[in-house]
Image (tube, rainbow, N blue to C red):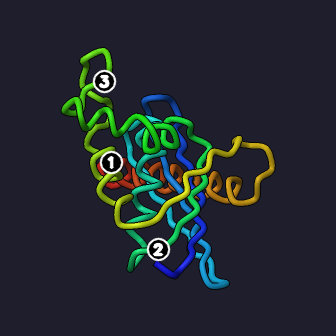
Amino acid sequence: MSEFVEIFTDGACKGNPGMGGWGALLRFAGRTRELCGGEIHTTNNRMELTAVIRALQALKRPCRVRLSTDSRYVQQGISTWVHNWKKAGWRTAAKKPVKNADLWRQLDALAVEHEIEWIWVRGHCGHDGNEAADTLANRGVASVQAEKNETHIQRQT
């Protein structure tokens, strides 16, 4: 694992649940790659997780990664909680099913392929990587809104 990649991720949701978007900014070897997308009906936590999953899926080989997120849910979940969830059969300490277990399982499988430092950053405080990821997440929401509007127009004609 010699390549170092810096990743910034964010999720956005207009209503929670509601229309959502995710964004990821990857920096490596002097290059930058932007990723974004969205879903019509989702939650902010699902978009936060999706941003991280899509960023890690974009890596072509095992890497050393510094991944910054403004989601304590993601940072603490993957660093601490996931270990106990797996031992308990994807159940919480209260014996309830883990929310978003489908995404946590994907993230857990992807995370073992890399050496990842999980960093929490305060959102909307001028951190350039986080602000860029936020912009991408909102672009993801806008793309879903545009698709929804286009579909609505096509149905009317």
Kindly indicate whether the residue at mark 2 contacts the one at mark 3 (C-beta within 8 angstroms). Answer: no
Residue 135 image offset from top left, x and y in percent: 65, 55
Q: Secondary structure at mark 3?
A: loop
Give, as a three-letter code, the residue at label 3.
Thr
Q: Earlier in the sequence, mark 1 or mark 3?
A: 3
Residue to which mark 3 is pinned: 92
User: From mark 1 to mark 2, how far is it between C-alphas?
Assistant: 49 Å
Count neighbours of disc 2 (C-alpha within 10 A) and say few if under 14, some if 14 to 19, many if 20 or more: some
The mark nearer the N terminus, 1 or 2, is 2
Q: Quadrant of residue 83?
A: top left
Viewer-side label of 1, 3: 3
Give the quadrant of residue 93: top left
**Residue 45, horizontal then vertical, whole percent:** 45, 37
* Residue 4 on image: x %, y %: 57, 75
Q: Residues within 10 Å of mark 3 (few under 14, many from 20)?
A: some
Q: Position of residue 10 (x, y in %)?
A: 56, 50
Q: Earlier in the sequence, mark 3 or mark 2?
A: 2
How many numbered markers are drawn? 3
How far apart are labels 3 and 2 at the CA level?
Answer: 31 Å
* Element type at mark 1: helix
Residue at (41% x, 61% y) in the render: 54
Kindly identify which residue carries mark 1: 156
> From what the image shows, is residue 17 above or below residue 35?
above
Left or right, 125 with respect to 62, comes to right
